[in-house]
């Protein structure tokens, strides 16, 4: 523990001491005491804790003497906590005049062993005393981490100790209760003052008196020791409903934080997915728009290519014959009167003429020789049977092509 608070109350007064670890030693940072309200002891404890600045996150150790409780030291075999508790139940009839009903046992094995076994501090009290302590706890602070009888913290090497708040007529020394009349002076107190000054950083204001807070300091010595955690099995006797569930609260908080962390993680993933989905939708729409634009452009390009081909065809066309009538007139003037043109087909490269004639010795190449623009390329003359007329097929080509 880095910090803890000890609340001790007896039949006359209540005390509180708050400790905090500083540079390897526990420092007594707050302390206070006041007379105990006999009708409402919880109110006194509540005011003390409030005055000392106690917070619910600080471990609290409650200490007091139970009604009809008995403290003693015996020897036992070093066992596990549950097994040692059962063994100590057989020790109670030897140590007590009568065994308490529904007996509750608090014990702490000490360091080292002797010929009889392991020394064990034992505090036994009837279960009927627990409701009074539970009432004080629930009405003042609601929860407490531990209940510790002050003398349960004694070590085997400790000297005499006298706590009138617990036993006004006896002091404890060398594993036995002895009459207080046998206690010589304050030598025992000086040894305890030396012990606590070594262990704790105590206030130097002159107001703090070790003797007045001896029970709180004795409990604090045990709580601040490294072996306290190992010996909690025999010391932890408070019912579960009186103890705070700090570990459970921490686990619940950890689960909540993990849930929030996972929620934040998945929220980030959902945000990324949402952003990616929006970007995908936008790109998909852009792709559709571009596909439509490509199709429209392709159609326009196809129409433009068709139009271009038409234009090229028109551009590449020859202008044709400008003097058709004159050339036909020149050709007609050379034909004799007994020759009749039946058909004529004029193309860019030739003129195909079909004629009919009744002349017997018609020499068309000689007759057409005066033509300037045309030359006879092909000539065929046929006469059928006894017919007097003959069919003439002739092909004229440009005179320039003949020259070539």
Image: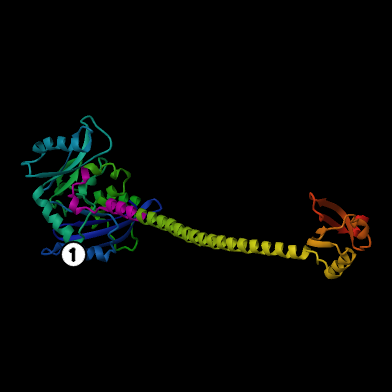
Q: Is residue 122 left or right of residue 209?
A: left
What residue lies at 19% left-to-right and 53% top-to-bottom?
A: 242
Locate residue 274, reporting x and y percent: 44, 59
Residue 157 falls inside the magenta stretch: no
Locate residue 177, reporting x and y percent: 15, 44
Locate residue 253, reporting x and y percent: 32, 55
Q: Residue furthest top?
A: 115
Residue 246 falls inside the magenta stretch: yes
Q: Is residue 116 above or below residue 38?
A: above
Q: Is residue 239 visible?
A: yes
Examine the residues drawn in magenta and state their main secondary structure.
helix
Q: Residues within 10 Å of mark 1 (few under 14, many from 20)?
A: many
Q: Is residue 103 left or right of residue 342?
A: left
What residue lies at 83% left-to-right and 56% top-to-bottom?
A: 395
What residue lies at 80% left-to-right and 50% top-to-bottom?
A: 386
* Residue indicated by mark 1: 44
Q: Residue furthest front?
A: 386
Which quarter of the image is occupied by the C terminus? bottom right
Residue range (magenta): 234-257
- Residues 195 and 280: in front is 280
Q: Is residue 353 visible?
A: no
Locate residue 214, reporting x and y percent: 24, 54
């Amino acid at each position: 523990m880095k910090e803890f608070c000890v609340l001790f109350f007896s039949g006359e007064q209540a005390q509180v001491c708050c400790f905090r670890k500083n540079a390897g030693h526990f420092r007594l940072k707050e302390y206070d005491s006041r007379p105990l309200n006999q009708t409402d002891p919880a109110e006194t404890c509540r005011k003390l804790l409030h005055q000392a600045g106690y917070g619910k996150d600080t471990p609290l150790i409650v200490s007091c003497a139970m009604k009809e409780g008995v403290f003693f030291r015996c020897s036992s075999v070093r066992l596990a906590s549950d097994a040692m508790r059962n063994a100590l139940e057989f020790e109670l009839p030897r140590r007590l005049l009568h065994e308490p009903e529904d007996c509750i046992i608090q014990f702490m094995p000490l360091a080292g062993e002797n010929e009889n076994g392991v020394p064990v501090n034992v505090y036994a009290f009837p279960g009927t005393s627990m409701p009074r302590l539970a009432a004080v706890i629930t009405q003042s602070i609601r929860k407490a981490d531990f209940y510790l009888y002050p003398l349960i913290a004694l070590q085997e090497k400790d000297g005499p100790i006298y706590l009138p708040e617990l036993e006004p007529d006896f002091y404890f020394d060398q594993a036995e209760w002895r009459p207080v009349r046998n206690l010589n002076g304050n030598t025992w107190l000086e040894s305890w003052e030396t012990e606590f000054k070594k262990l704790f950083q105590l206030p130097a204001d002159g107001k703090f008196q070790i003797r007045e807070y001896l029970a709180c300091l004795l409990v604090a010595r045990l709580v601040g020791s490294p072996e306290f955690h190992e010996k909690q099995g025999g010391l932890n006797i408070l019912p579960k409903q009186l103890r705070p569930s700090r570990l459970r609260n921490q686990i619940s908080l950890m689960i909540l934080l993990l849930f929030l962390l996972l929620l934040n993680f998945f929220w980030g993933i959902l945000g990324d997915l949402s952003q990616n989905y929006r970007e995908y939708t936008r790109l998909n729409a852009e792709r559709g728009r571009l596909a439509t634009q490509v199709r429209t452009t392709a159609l326009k390009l196809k129409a433009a290519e068709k139009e271009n081909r038409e234009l090229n065809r028109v551009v590449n066309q020859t202008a044709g014959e400008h003097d058709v009538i004159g050339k036909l007139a020149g050709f007609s003037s050379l034909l004799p009167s007994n020759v009749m043109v039946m058909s004529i087909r004029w193309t860019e490269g030739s003129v195909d003429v079909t004629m009919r004639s009744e002349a017997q010795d018609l020499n068309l190449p000689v007759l057409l020789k005066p033509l300037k623009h045309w030359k006879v390329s092909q000539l065929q003359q046929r006469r059928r049977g006894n017919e007097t007329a003959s069919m003439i097929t002739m092909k004229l080509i440009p005179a320039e092509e003949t020259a070539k």
